Amino acid sequence: MPKPTVAIVGRPNVGKSTIFNRIVGERISIVEDIAGVTRDRIYSSGEWLNHDFNIIDTGGIDIGDEPFLEQIRQQAEIAIDEADVIILMTSGREGLTSADEEVAKILYRSKKPVVVAVNKVDNFEMRDQIYDFYALGFGEPIPISGSHGIGIGDLLDEVAKKFPTREESDYDEDVIKFSLIGRPNVGKSSLVNAILGEERVIVSNIAGTTRDAVDSPYKYNGDDYVIIDTAGMRKKGKVYESTEKYSVLRALRAIERSDVVLVVLDGEEGIIEQDKKIAGYAHQAGRAVVIVVNKWDAVEKDDKTMKRFEEKIRAEFQFLDYAPIVFLSAKTKRRIHTLLPMINMASENHARRVPTNVLNDVIMDAVAMNPTPTHNGKRLKIFYVTQAAVKPPTFIVFVNDPELMHFSYERFLENKIREAFGFEGTPIKIFSRLRK
């Protein structure tokens, strides 16, 4: 079920990035007291009152001709288009301005729920300054202070009230949902068409032909699938034309709805830094992953070409060492038959449970082979392990002191679990907890 999306919008220098950082709990956006310093939409996740949501920080919208303002306006308008709820950020220090009113006009056209936040209200005496903002017509303004963290909870309360009611998925549990992600023009739409055996998705050599996610139900050998095609992800820093509406967020939504994510690479062009960033979204979301090297027909090959390319993938994508690799050509359909078995395997492992007694036998054998680490004379003791969840498989290790669990030993335990139970194609999560 996709998470709702919140966009923070407003004229420059009202503190959008500061509030964004407060909500996500870390300094992701650059915060600088210069108008227009945030030039790209920045995405992260937040949580409030059991609501998980995506959040977008945008550059300010202005009507002047300062550098980057047109690009900032385009970024903000795309963010508005993607959002379920919009926070209109204003400043109590400067009061209501004509630029605030111009931003409000853009938001009226969006027909999206809007919450007005009046930032820089740093003390109680300044609260009288919020009343002018009723004139924007979006209801009661919320006084906040990003620098002091005042009023953020009240703001998120109002935002959460406006989240849409999400319907459960229309697809049955046994339907395997997989999405294709990758930078533009790596052949995702061609690959969808090759799998489906029909020209269902527009295919073009122009990067970014696919504008949005497209669901394609599909049946093969008695198994049901849903293929989720997504718009190509553009490198951050490029100007997004409002007609194209490229969006990382749309790919993130597709990932959230997927059981398996196909990370599509261009075999002809090779691996670039953006490929790793895109693959990171699927890994961070805990989805099963299959790496697909497309356009393999266009590569000049000898008997070692595939092995060398696979070695390069393993070196560049070390965080996806569990993901199987498939080489194919969507254009000629060569090796296309190898893809669905890999998707089935990854999906099955993603949802796999292992018996607790067998799991503990494996862990105790691992500890006997490689004793637990010590720190300051205190040794880590592992009492027992249980699998807490699937999609991805998640294990809780009950210990005498979680601080003694070094990441290298956690990695050792993960490797032993993989040796015993497979789990190819899916990430594994391991958490240490104090036994009570």
Image (cartoon, helix red, strand yellow):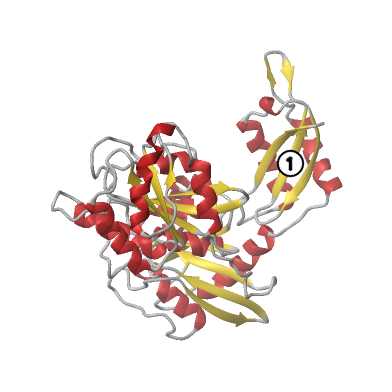
SS for dot 1: strand
Which x, y percent locates residue 253?
50, 62
Viewer-proximal residue among 58 and 196:
58
Q: Which residue: 41% across, 63% down? A: 82
Quarter occupied by the N terminus: bottom right
Viewer-proximal residue among 155 and 341:
155
Q: Which residue: 41% across, 36% down? A: 145
Quarter occupied by the C terminus: top right
Which x, y percent locates residue 79?
36, 59
Q: Which residue: 55% across, 57% down? A: 161
Q: Residue furthest right?
A: 357
**Whether residue 152 can be seen here:** yes
Mark 1 nearby-residue class (10 Å; few <14, some 14–19, many ≥20):
some
Residue 238 lies, with reference to residue 409, above or below; the image says below
What kind of residue is marked 1?
A: Ile
**Residue 305's image quarter?**
bottom left
Q: Residue furthest top?
A: 377
Residue 30 lies, with reference to residue 49, above or below; the image says above
**Whether residue 303 can be seen here:** no
- Residue on which the image places disc 1: 396
**Residue 204's image quarter?**
bottom left
